[in-house]
Amino acid sequence: MATIYSKLDAKDYARENMRGIWAAALNPFADDLSLDEAGLRANIRHWIDDLDIQGLFIAGKQGEFFSMSLEERKRNFEIAVEECAGKAGVIVSVSDQNFDTVLDLSLHAQHCGADYIVVHAPVLSFIHDRGEVLYQYYKALCDRLDIGIAMWSHPDSGYLMQPEECARIADLPNIIAIKYSVPRDMYVQLTHMVGDRIQVSTSAEDDWLDNIEELGWQLYLCSSPPYHLQTKNDKRMDEYTRLAFAGNFEEARRVRDSLNPVREAMLRSRPADKPQAFGKYWQELLGQVGGRVRPPMLELTDAEKAVIQEAFETCGLKL
C-alpha cells in the first residue's frame, strides 16, 4: 500500500485532512514487558470511537519508542493503521539518530498505509551553526520519500530549531507540518512565517484554544490530554475545540476552564521522574489499558499510586 496522495500534493492533502485533535499514544506493555497488542487495539478503538479523536501520533516518546526494537516499532505502525482505517488519521514517529533506521521506518510507514511520518530533529554533537545541516537532513528524506513529513523540534535534541531554519525546510515539497515544542513566542513567529504552507502545532493543551483563536490553528499535534482529560461521558476538550472552530470563543473558554480541576489534579500528583508510568496509571483509572513501562522508565510505587488515585477521584471527570 502506498500513500493516496503524490509528493507534490502532500501539503494540500494535509491541509485538508490533518485537522482537529490528534493524540500521542502511550504503549501498554504487559507484565513480561511485551507489547500488549490487544490492549493497544482496545485503547485506539476507545479513543476514536468514544472520544472522537481525529488522529493518532504513534511510537513517539510518549510511546517509549526508544525502548522498542525496529520490528516492534513497525508492528506498532501496522496496528494503528489497521485500527484507524477509515476512522482517524495516523502519523508515526520514525525518529532515530541513525539515518538508515529513519529511512527504513519511513519506507515501512509509507508502504503500510500511515498517513504521515514525524521526524525529530537529530542530536548534532559539536555543531553550533545548524541551519544547513538540518536543511540537508530533511531534504535527504524528502528526496527519497513520497509520504508527508512533519518536523519535530524539542529540547531533548539539545537545541531548538529556529523559526528561520524551520521556514526554509517548510519549502520542501512533502513537509506538511511541525510539532514545535518551544516557547510560545517562537511558534507564534513561525506560524506567521509559514502558516499558509504547513500546519504549525505544539503539545501544550493549555494553549490550544488561544492558538485557535489568535493564530487560526486547525491542528492539535499532540500529547496525551485528549484521552487523559476525557471519558465517553465527558468530552469537554472535544466540546471546547468544536466551539472554538465555530467561532464561539466565550463559551469555549468556559468549557475549557471547567477542566482546570482535572489539570490541577494531574499536575499535583504526577511524579516528576515518571511521566509514562503516571500516564498509564491514569489511563487505568479511566478504564483504559495502561500496563507497565520499560527501562529506563521507572514504575510507580504503591504510595505514588495512592496519591494519584485520590487526586483522580476528586478531579470531577465523569466516568
Image: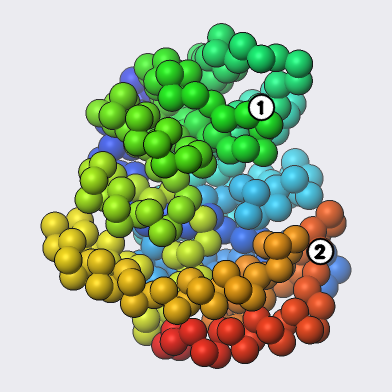
Q: Quadrant of the C terminus?
A: bottom left
Describe residue 312's horizontal placement relative to residue 231 as left or right. Answer: right
Residue 204 point in image, percent of width and height: 46, 53
Q: In the image shown, does 289 or 248 lie closer to the viewer?
A: 248
Please determine whether, in this image, residue 313 is positioned above or below residue 150: below
List the residue tagged with mark 2.
298
Bin the neighbour count of mark 1 within 10 Å (Cα to Cα): few under 14, some 14-19, many 20 and up: many
103 relative position to 313: left or right: right
Image-quadrant location for residue 271 = bottom right
Instruction: Tell me which label, 1 or 2, sits earlier in the chain.
Output: 1
Residue 223 in percent (x, y) is at 51, 56
How many numbered discs, if any? 2
Question: Above or below — where is 254 with respect to 166?
Answer: below
Residue 255 in the image: state x and y as whole percent. Answer: 28, 73
- Residue 281's label in the rendered image is none
Amino acid type at circle 2 is Leu
Distance, label 1 to label 2, CA atoms, is 25 Å
Circle 1: residue type: Pro
| Mark 2 surroundings within 10 Å by alpha-carbon count, few (fewer than 14), some (14 through 19), many (20 or more) | some
Residue at the (66%, 44%) spot, across then down = 74
**Residue 95 visible here:** no
The residue labelled by disc 1 is: 122
Residue 294 placement (x, y as % from top left): 80, 59
Residue 15, visible in the rendered structure: yes
Q: Horizontally, is 182 left or right of 212 in the view?
A: right
Question: Are the residues flagged by discs 1 and 2 in contact, CB closer than 8 Å?
Answer: no
At a point 55% along the width and 13% down the height, the residue shown is 131
Determine the secondary structure under disc 1: loop
- Name the residue located 78 percent from the left edge and 73 percent from the top edge: 300
